[in-house]
Image (cartoon, rainbow, N blue to C red):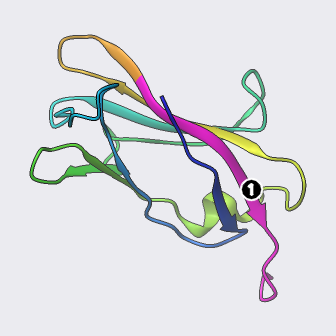
Amino acid sequence: MKFIHLKWPRGDSRNPKITILDGDGAAIDVSAATIKFTVRLAADDTLAFQKTSTAGEIVVSGASDNIATVTITAADTAAMTVGRKNYNWDLEVTLASGHVITPVSGPLTIQQDQTYT
């Protein structure tokens, strides 16, 4: 599993592009997969927000159909706590075969921005 530390200003929109690879670095075709991008303060904590491919919030692209672009709105991060507490996120993929993988995860730090209202 790949580990990526994300840092976003509170209340900002983002569209992270996440490349999905297997353990050997080869592209995994996820064009027929169900993908979830989940953010929580801790693994068993209340959901901060979740985006899914079934809701159209994650779009698959790329020559190998292995790039997931997640649509994060300003409202998704507006109520999140700024500061030292890191949220945790992961990208879970359920392949057409039913096989479930989590190819990437990490902390998410919400940063203060000066124009937040």
Q: Can you give x and y, in whole percent of width and height, for residue 51 in the image? A: 47, 44
Residue identified by numbered label 1: 109
Residue 76 colored magenta? no
Instruction: Name the residue at the bottom extreme.
Output: 115
Residue 115 colored magenta? yes
Which region is colored magenta?
Answer: 102-117
* Left or right for 17, reference 116: left
Residue at 43% x, 34% y: name it. Answer: 36
Instruction: Kindly identify the amino acid type of the residue bearing the numbered disc 1.
Output: Thr
Q: Can you give x and y, in whole percent of width and height, for residue 68 in the image? A: 31, 48
Looking at the image, is 27 positioned above or below residue 117?
above
Looking at the image, is 45 positioned above or below residue 52?
above
Q: Can you give x and y, in whole percent of width and height, for residue 78 in the image? A: 72, 65
What kind of secondary structure does the magenta stretch mostly adopt?
strand
* SS under mark 1: strand
Looking at the image, is 43 positioned above or below residue 29?
above
> In which quadrant will I find the C terminus?
bottom right
Residue at 36% x, 15% y: name it. Answer: 100
Q: Nearer the viewer, residue 75 or 17?
A: 17
Instruction: Name the residue at the right extreme.
Output: 84
Q: Quadrant of residue 38?
A: top right
Q: Can you give x and y, in whole percent of width and height, for residue 87 in the image? A: 74, 44
Looking at the image, is 113 positioned above or below residue 47?
below
